Amino acid sequence: MSIIGKELVRLASVDSTNNYAARGVSEGRFGHGTVILANEQTQGRGQWSRQWLTAPGLDLAMSVVLLPERFPAMMQFTLAKAAALAVHDVVAELLRAAGKNVAEVRIKWPNDILVGRSKVSGILIENELQGSFVASSVVGIGLNVDSRGMESDLAATSLRQECGRAMGVEPVLDMMCKRLEWWWQKVYADDGAVSSAYTERLWAKGRFADFTLDGNDFRARPLDVDASGRLIVEEEEGAVRAYGLERLRFKR
């Protein structure tokens, strides 16, 4: 039985669905699988505290509460992989239905979803640890559904722009909950398959891309992502190393 989305909290406006979900978890109000959906998000956040913009009523702004059972903290990035795969699947399925090239849909490390080189979705996961286990996880997902006319410097797109027609938030929400549930179950059944699928869909995998490393320009070829979420890259001189988010970032 599907749990994710069975309890759905709808909000007209909120600062951040992640903040709201985290407060609910700390107060014991939200169980596993609770989805917080906001029509408007006034202070949405992405990676590195960047602002995430959503058009009220047109885009998907949601957070999912996950309460893992004795899930090792050292494997917490597997949850991020599962979330990214779920969003990837939804975007790919809608593009496929519209007759578009789904090979253009990729996961940009750590968990942005791109169509070509344009960002269609961002994911922000915030975990609470208890000892060596993940006590709770709040998965924030922002997905551009029906918005149009993004500023060109944002390098963003939407499902409507890619598919050529209005999608509607509700059908996309339903698809998202089902794919999140599927990948959540896969985390426990076969975490190796989750990691393999994530790597297979990794943007720029096997080709050189521009990064910043410790604030300096850096070129490397992404190869894989390790269990802790570090990107494994081949540097131009041939050395293979793993770097975390605190040091390595794709150049915008």
Image: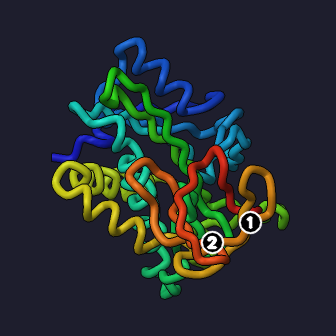
Quadrant in which residue 124 is drawn = top right
**Is residue 208 or residue 112 the one in the foreground?**
208
Q: Give the residue furthest to the top.
A: 27
Location of the C terminus by quadrant is bottom right
* In the depicted structure, whether residue 108 falls above or below residue 2: below
Instruction: Looking at the image, tell me whether mark 1 or mark 2 is earlier in sequence order.
Output: 1
Q: Is 161 displayed left or right of 38 in the figure?
A: right
Which residue lies under the disc numbered 2? 235
**Is residue 122 or residue 95 the one in the foreground?**
122
Secondary structure under tag 2 reads strand
**Is residue 94 or residue 240 the one in the foreground?**
240
In the image, what residue type sits under mark 1? Phe
Residue 18, image x and y in percent? 53, 32
On the question of residue 151 being in view, the answer is: yes
In the image, what residue type sits under mark 2? Glu
User: Which residue: 53% across, 58% down?
Assistant: 242
Which residue lies under the disc numbered 1? 218
User: Which residue: 61% across, 58% down?
Assistant: 144
**Is residue 224 or residue 119 the one in the foreground?**
224
Do the residues under discs 1 and 2 have CB atoms within 8 angstroms? Answer: yes
User: Which residue: 71% across, 71% down?
Assistant: 219
Secondary structure under tag 1 reads strand
